[in-house]
Image: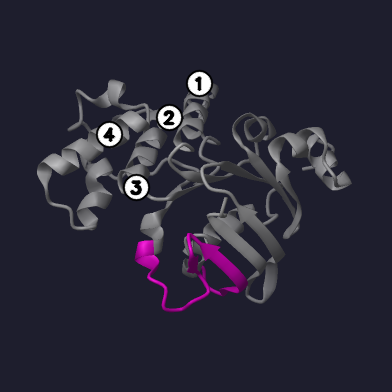
């Protein structure tokens, strides 16, 4: 099966200091790939490479080859707006817009120029159902998104992301600000979404990585130490530093 993301000899620098060093790996489609490692090891930087969000950081530059869904991100003429439509992003802290629940989910569709009211209504409902939120908010779509609980807000943000039907979803610690019950709902949702999407998730939660991901990559000090199936990483790591990290000896 052809990878959805191919990374070859990737370096990322912040003001000429390397944040990622010579990373090579392939990410499979319709799978959940977890990025683990201690704070400051380059996980979020690596995640942001895939939709060029590091472009917003002054002094950041990239070397190497990154192919996302067939497009070479090193090309200066790449259509970044199209890239970010195909590669959605869910952030650590829920960030709903100060709008209604309906308008939050419909936002991306309207930005892309969709005007058919019936089409937008159907896509909003479908996205909320996919995000396991419809039964909780379906009778209050005009209510403020900011009135929802933290877990509901995060599922709303996921619904907003999938409404425009990306091919890849990036998640940067999407449950770190949530309680265990809300976290369990988000994890169940993420597992269900891999049937339609390829998901890359940054997490500090080792148990979460082992529960939901198919593949796990361990980063340390800007290096990719080990990348394998999640089962192998957690049960039979090949590198001593991987074993030390997942068993809590450092981190």
- In space, the residues marked 2 and 4 are separated at their CA atoms by 19 Å
Which residue is drawn at the image coordinates 19% and 36% (left, top)? 122
For the point 60% across and 58% down, the residue is 46
Q: Nearer the viewer, residue 120 or 1?
A: 1
> Which of the numbered marks, if any, corresponds to residue 151?
2
Q: Which mark is residue 165?
A: 3
Answer with mark 4 or mark 3, whichever residue precedes in sequence.
Answer: 4
- The answer, for residue 146, to whether it is visible in the render is no
Q: CA distance from mark 4 to mark 3?
A: 11 Å
Q: Is residue 98 left or right of residue 121?
A: right
Name the element at disc 2.
helix
Q: Residues within 10 Å of mark 1 (few under 14, many from 20)?
A: few
Residue at the (26%, 42%) spot, across then down: 104
Q: Earlier in the sequence, mark 2 or mark 4?
A: 4
Above or below, comparing residue 49 to residue 88 in the picture: below
Whether residue 220 is visible here, answered yes or no, is yes
Tell me if label 2 and label 1 are in contact, CB under 8 Å: yes
Q: Residue at x 45, y 36 (%)?
A: 193
**Magenta span covers which residues?**
57-82
Q: Residues within 10 Å of mark 2 (few under 14, many from 20)?
A: many
Name the residue at the front extreme.
1
Q: Is residue 76 magenta?
A: yes
Residue 88: image location, x then y, percent? 42, 51
Q: Which residue is mark 4?
A: 126
Dot placed on the residue nearer the N-terminal end, 1 or 4: 4
Badges 2 and 4: C-beta atoms under 8 Å apart? no
Pointer 2 or 3: first along the chain: 2
* Relative to 77, residue 124 above or below: above
| Left or right: 178 as drawn, with respect to 128 | right
Image quadrant assignment for residue 146: top left
């Amino acid at each position: 099966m052809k990878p959805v993301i191919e990374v070859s000899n990737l370096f990322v620098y912040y003001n000429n200091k390397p944040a990622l060093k010579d990373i090579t790996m392939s990410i499979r489609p319709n799978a959940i790939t977890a990025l683990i490692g201690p704070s400051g090891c380059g996980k979020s930087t690596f995640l942001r490479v895939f939709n060029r969000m590091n472009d917003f950081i002054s002094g950041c530059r990239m070397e190497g080859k990154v192919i996302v869904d067939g497009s070479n991100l090193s090309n200066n003429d790449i259509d970044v707006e199209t890239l970010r439509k195909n590669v959605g992003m869910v952030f650590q802290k829920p960030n709903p817009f100060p709008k209604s629940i309906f308008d939050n989910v419909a936002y991306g569709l309207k930005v892309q120029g969709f005007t058919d009211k019936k089409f937008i209504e159907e896509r909003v409902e479908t996205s909320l159902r996919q995000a396991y939120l419809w039964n909780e908010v379906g009778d209050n779509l005009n209510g403020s998104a900011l009135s929802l609980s933290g877990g509901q807000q995060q599922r709303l943000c996921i619904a907003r992301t999938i409404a425009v039907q990306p091919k890849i979803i990036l998640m940067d610690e999407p449950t770190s600000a949530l309680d265990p019950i809300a976290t369990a709902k988000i994890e169940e949702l993420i597992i269900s979404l891999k049937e339609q999407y390829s998901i890359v998730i940054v997490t500090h939660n080792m148990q979460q990585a082992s529960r939901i991901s198919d593949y796990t990559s361990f980063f340390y000090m800007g290096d990719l130490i080990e990348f394998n199936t999640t089962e192998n990483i957690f049960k039979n790591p090949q590198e001593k530093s991987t074993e030390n990290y997942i068993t809590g000896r450092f981190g």
